Image: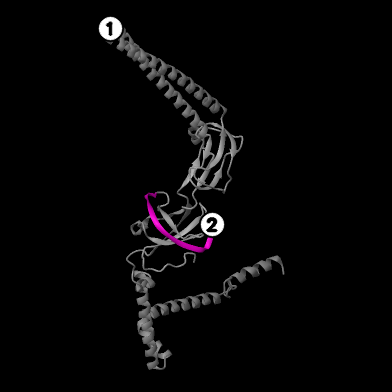
Amino acid sequence: MTEYNRKLAETLRSFSLEPSLPTIEPPVQKHRRLVFSGVMLTLGIGAIALVVLWSEVAPLLKTMIEPNPGTAAGKSNVSLSEKEGSRAVSTVSAAGSPRQASLPRPTSLAEITGSGFVVAPRAVTVFSKYEGQVASIRTRIGDHVETGQIVVGIEDISADFTLQQARADADAARFVLDGKILELRQASNSLRRNIALSARNAVSTQAVEEAQTARDMAENAVDQARQTYVRAQLGVSMAQERIDALIVRAPIAGTVTRLDAHVGGRILARIDSIKENESLLTITDTQSLAIDADVAETNIAALRPGLRGEAVLDGFPEKPFTIEVQQLWPVASAEKGTITLRLALVDPPAGILPNMAARIRITTNPTQRQGDISQ
């Protein structure tokens, strides 16, 4: 076939009435889309109808599922009762806890709890009254001392010199006083003699007056000398007091709980030692201990002196003992929202020490039986 005949055949074929070639998307897939859309539309319409007609359809379904009407009714009643009970419990829970609703509400707080520490109300920090050097220490930490017992000896050479000088001045003043007293006696004798001679007209009146003046002057000199001697004696007493103060004695009976002094150390006078916080030692009366405990300030209305409770120390957890409210602090703590109580110890266990941690429980109802606070 020539090229011309081939092109002519293709041109004639394009004018043919035969169906064209199949398209890329077959008609079968379009049909499937239409079927799927119809099914989804039917399910949607059925769901809407079920929701709308549920109140009428539900009894029929229930009757079909439960073949025994009597049994079904009984179960329905039981379910209804359980629902009503649950609703009642829910109502109580909304108003308050069911346990709280079933118990009577107390008119006042029965117990007040808190924590604190053992304190020693009688504790004395000992300072030296005068400056000096520690010469001896006659006690140790933990020793028991009695009132007036020597605890520290202080040496001050200047104090010894001052005492010696004061004694010398007192002796000199005494000698002067004795001389003035002798002059007064002589003046008094001269006056008496002149008065006697004047009575016999042996001396003039002027001589008597001069003797009277001499006696008065001697008497005045004695008074001045006596005052000087008294001042000298006062100087001796002051110097002796300084010497005595260098022997430090225990101001109270108790236990030495702190000892800062050491032999050979230089100490300041009391006024300076207080500023520098340099004490010799601290004595604590461990026989009169108490507990200072903090409780919530909301309990103040129920607190008063005389209330009793129970305390447990962390050092003696198995030995609770009785406590009694002695005092309420006059101010509350703004930082903690608490108020401090001073509690007396009633028959505490042996071996309690200051600063021990304590837990306390105070009974505001006297008829209530105390339990074990450690639980």
Looking at the image, can residue 258 be seen? yes
What's the CA distance linking mark 2 and mark 1? 96 Å
Whether residue 333 sits left or right of residue 147 in the image: it is left
Q: Residue at x 46, y 21 (%)?
A: 174
Residue 69 image point, x, y percent: 38, 93
The residue positioned farthest toward the right in the image shown: 1
Is 109 rendered above or below residue 334? below
Tell me which numbered mark, 2 or 1, is placed earlier along the sequence: 1
Quadrant in the picture for residue 158? top right
**Image quarter (top left, top right, bottom left or bottom right) of the N terminus:** bottom right
The magenta stretch is 316-333
Q: Inspect the image, locate mark 1, and give the three-letter code of the amino acid beneath it.
A: Asn
Tag in front: 2 or 1: 1
Of residue 196 and residue 146, the one placed in the foreground of this image is 196
* Residue 155: assigned label: none
| Callout 2 amino acid | Gly
Q: According to the image, label 1 marks what residue?
A: 201
Using a 10 Å C-alpha cutoff, classify the residue at mark 1 as few (fewer than 14 neighbours), some (14 to 19) or many (20 or more): few
